[in-house]
Amino acid sequence: MIIIKSQVEINKIAAACRIVAEVLEGLKTFVKEGMSTADIETYVDTEIIKRGAIPAFKGYRGYPSSVCISVNDQVVHGIPSRTTRLKNGDIVSIDLGAILDGFYGDAALTIPVGRIGFDASRLIMVTEEAFYRGIEKAVVGNRVSDISAAIQAYVESNGFSVVRAFVGHGIGRSLHEEPQIPNFGKPGQGPRLKEGMTIAIEPMVNIGGPDIRILDDGWTAVTADGSLSAHYEHTVAITKNGPKILTKL
């Protein structure tokens, strides 16, 4: 069931989302060569908690950490570690959520570490632009797959592929609600978008093929062919005046 939110509920989601946005903004300057991914988790925990919110991911369906940190060929759900240290040329995708007053905010971005290569830089840019191609379709009256098709078309026109094993989602009082928002598909299919829906649109893009595999930790998804992957996500409210990005400052 797709839950339509009242303006009061959207305001509460927006408050949680603002915290997510502030923490992600801080990460753009915090993340540096030599630090461990556990250092990043500590930063995220501290910044969320001092704003009066709760890190949303820790313990969710058994996930062991409060943020997902995925490096290079890791697609999503990378578990922070003291032994995983960032190197010049890495790209690191950070996906985090916050709970405030019972409502969730969720967003992700991919950050370059030091000086990255041309392909990695282009991957990050295409992934972010794919989100904006998708959000252009996130308007009242369109269908979910209009978003999906726009993302897929843009990514594939640039020679990359979208991950199919993971999708975007509705969000509100729960981290994952209906509907699912795939990053692939034909336009004109799926639920119709209505005012009051809140959704997380999150392209996950690989330089190589779309297939993934899960590491032995049971969580970390990596590209099957070892190619680089990037992730970009925002929580969005569907309004009569168009989509509103809630996790952006």
Image (spheres, helix red, strand yellow):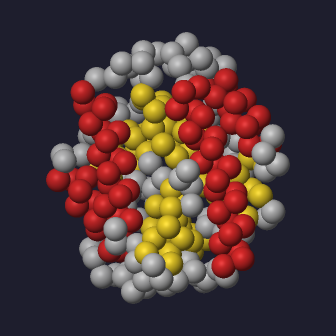
Residue at point 48% right, 43% down? 109
Looking at the image, residue 109 lies above or below residue 177: above
Residue 83 image point, x, y percent: 62, 17
Q: Is residue 71 left or right of residue 18?
A: left
Q: Is residue 8 left or right of residue 209?
A: right
Q: Which is nearer the eye, 138 or 212?
A: 138
Looking at the image, residue 162 lies above or below residue 144: above
Looking at the image, residue 134 lies above or below residue 226: below
Residue 65 visible in image: no
Residue 174 image point, x, y percent: 69, 66
Residue 112 visible in image: yes
Residue 195 image point, x, y percent: 52, 83
Q: Which is nearer the eye, 165 or 109?
A: 109
Pick out the residue farthest to the top. Answer: 34
Quadrant location, the N terminus: bottom right
Residue at point 24% right, 27% down? 118
Residue 110 image point, x, y percent: 45, 38
Residue at point 34% right, 22% down? 116
Mark count: 0
Looking at the image, residue 30 lies above or below residue 47: above
